[in-house]
Image (cartoon, rainbow, N blue to C red):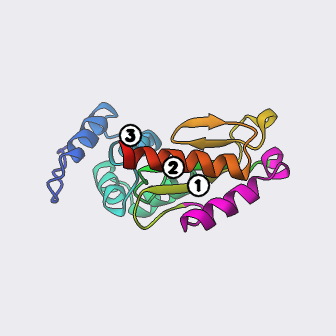
Amino acid sequence: MVSGVHPSGDERFGLVDTALTRARYAPDQLIELLHVAQGIFGHLSPDVLHYLARELRLPPSTVFGVATFYSLFTFEPPGDHSCTVCTGTACFVEGADEIVAALQDAHGVVAGHTAPDRRFALSTARCLGSCGMAPVIVVDGAVSGYATVESTLQAVQAVLAEEVAG
């Protein structure tokens, strides 16, 4: 198979080519290759999805359909900092929705999106598997349980302030 040279000249596509070679361009490796591409680019843009479709000789609709089926794939560039709020049953009962609403109000971003300045992304998860510590949040990869509106806003403000100070 001919390795794809992307017209943009973005060298990260070379890393995708390496993964494609390891996967032997097998269409049944699509999900793994989507994970690899997301790891390389931070998200799955239409350009990346079309590239994978072409290289795997799959219809773009198939690649897009698989990518959009799984909630672990994201289609927007990530923010510099992120907060994920678990909205599973236990977290919901303990006030997760109030935490999400407070973050949306404080940072002007809707859950599932990144603020226009790309500094902060807010997302929700159906269950993070830590129901005994509900509500659970993840700020820049650090998991915190028994979160409150106040503790969450402080945690997010702290990571945003570190960026300014550091």
Q: Nearer the viewer, residue 14 or 53?
A: 14
The kind of secondary structure element at disc 2 is: strand
Look at the magenta stretch and give its main secondary structure: helix
The alpha-carbon separation of the residues under discs 3 and 1 comes to 21 Å
Under circle 1, the secondary element is strand
Earlier along the polypeptide chain: callout 3 or callout 1?
3
At label 1, which amino acid type do we have?
Ser
Q: Position of residue 56 (x, y in %)?
A: 33, 48
Mark toward the viewer: 2 or 1:
2
Q: Where, by quadrant of the figure, is residue 58 drawn?
A: bottom left
- Seen as rendered, the residue at the extreme front is 165
Residue type, label 2: Ser
Q: Earlier in the sequence, mark 2 or mark 3?
A: 3
Crowding near the residue tagged with mark 2, few <14, some 14–19, many ≥20 C-alpha atoms within 10 Å: many
Inspect the magenta stretch and tell me whether residue 83 lies in it: no
Pick the residue in front: 65 or 26: 65
| Residue segment shown in magenta | 89-112
Residue carrying label 2: 82
Q: Which residue is mark 3?
A: 36
Q: Residue at x 17, y 59 (%)?
A: 8
Q: For the residue marked with disc 3, what is the amino acid?
A: Val
Residue 100 belongs to magenta span: yes
How many C-alpha atoms fall within 10 Å of the one at disc 1: few (<14), some, or many (≥20)? Answer: some
- 27 horizontally vs 147: left or right: left
Residue tagged 1? 123
141 over 13 or under it: above or below: above
